[in-house]
Image (cartoon, rainbow, N blue to C red):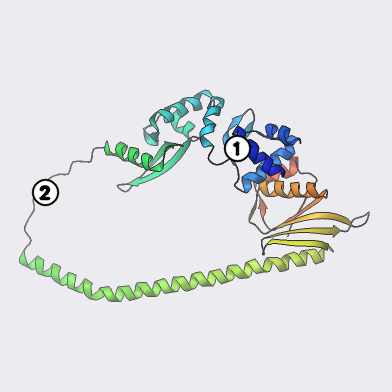
Amino acid sequence: MDNRQRILDLIRLKGPVIPIQVAKEIRTDTMIASAHLSELVASRHLKVSSVKHGSSPLYYIPGQEAMLQVFATNLNEKEKRTYDILKEHLVLQDSAQEPLVRYTLREIKDFAVPLQVNYDNKSELFWKWYLLPNEDAEKRIKAILGKVEPKKEEKQTVLEPKKEEIKKVEEKKKEIEERKPKAEKIERKVTEERVERKEERGKIGEKRDESFSSVLEGFISENKIEVVEKNVLKKDSEVEMVVRLPSSVGNLLYFCKVKNKKKISDGDLSSAYIQSQSRKMPILFLTNGELTKKAKEMLEQEFKSMTLKKI
């Protein structure tokens, strides 16, 4: 059975886990287990928590969110107090809370969901208990906002309009009605121009995507890389290859992962690393993107044997 499937089966059975539990189950070290978990998070098969068990986050399957309450005891004293308040009231108005509660609401990301509400030309931040349905949250927010008494308006004396004023209003209304067809034509023309520009931008984007293949071929040619196997997973986006690289001791076989992506995550690196390990080959990672902060740390600390080149 594939290790990733074994991990998913384990989490379905036991609920949220940490890497060391996974390592024991699949009989490997914690680093490899973490790499498998990161890959499953990147492919959206798993979610990762903010709350920690020891020094490690928890990995769980979507739908197991309720089980995270078991680990609420791992929150610090101030966060646990805010957790209890939110769990009791289900919805909290941010501006009505004391500063410490407002701060800790932003820290307990697993349990507090922010909702930005616009009303009466104002914007107000609310927090809902993470398991509360949106419909129930909406009702509670309306109830909270309903407690705010509207400003009393001063009574104004209503004067009957004069005949001259009525005539002016009718003339103005007629003038607006005459202009309306012209305005609709102008608006239609502007909309058509926007559609044309959007299509042009799409064509430009397509040209940029197509150029990635030629950039990759140019890089391979310049660096005298021999392609032994090539598997295009996504056109102009993701390629896997087995290549020969020249070295001082002769040509060496490498597993090569190619990604056309703006941001390269730790999950991207972990997935490529696992594939190279399964093939028992060193790894060459080619990309035109930038590494995320976590990916840089992983490359420097855990994947030192990985060769990453920007093309």
Quarter assignment of residue 191: bottom left
Name the amino acid type tagged 1: Arg
Residue positioned most to the front: 1
Q: Residue furthest right?
A: 249
Q: Is residue 109 visible?
A: no
The answer to whether 154 appears left or right of 292 in the picture is left
Q: Which residue is mark 2?
A: 156
Between the C-alphas of marks 2 and 1, the distance is 67 Å
- Front residue of 160/64: it is 64
- Mark 2 or 1, nearer chain start: 1
- Where is residue 180? Give x, y as percent: 26, 73
Mark 1 secondary-structure assignment? helix
The answer to whether residue 292 is visible is yes
How far across and down, in percent of the image, does residue 301 sit?
74, 40
Q: Is residue 155 above or below residue 85?
A: below
Q: Residue at x 78, y 44 (%)?
A: 304
Residue at (86%, 55%) from the top-left corner? 253
Residue 310 picture quarter: bottom right
Q: Mark 1 highlights which residue?
A: 12
Residue type highlighted by circle 2:
Gln
Give the x, y percent position of residue 281: 83, 50
Q: Is residue 66 left or right of residue 272?
A: left
Q: Callout 1 environment at 10 Å: few (<14), some (14 to 19), or many (20+)? A: few
Q: Residue at coordinates 62% horizontally, 70% vertically from top-left?
A: 207
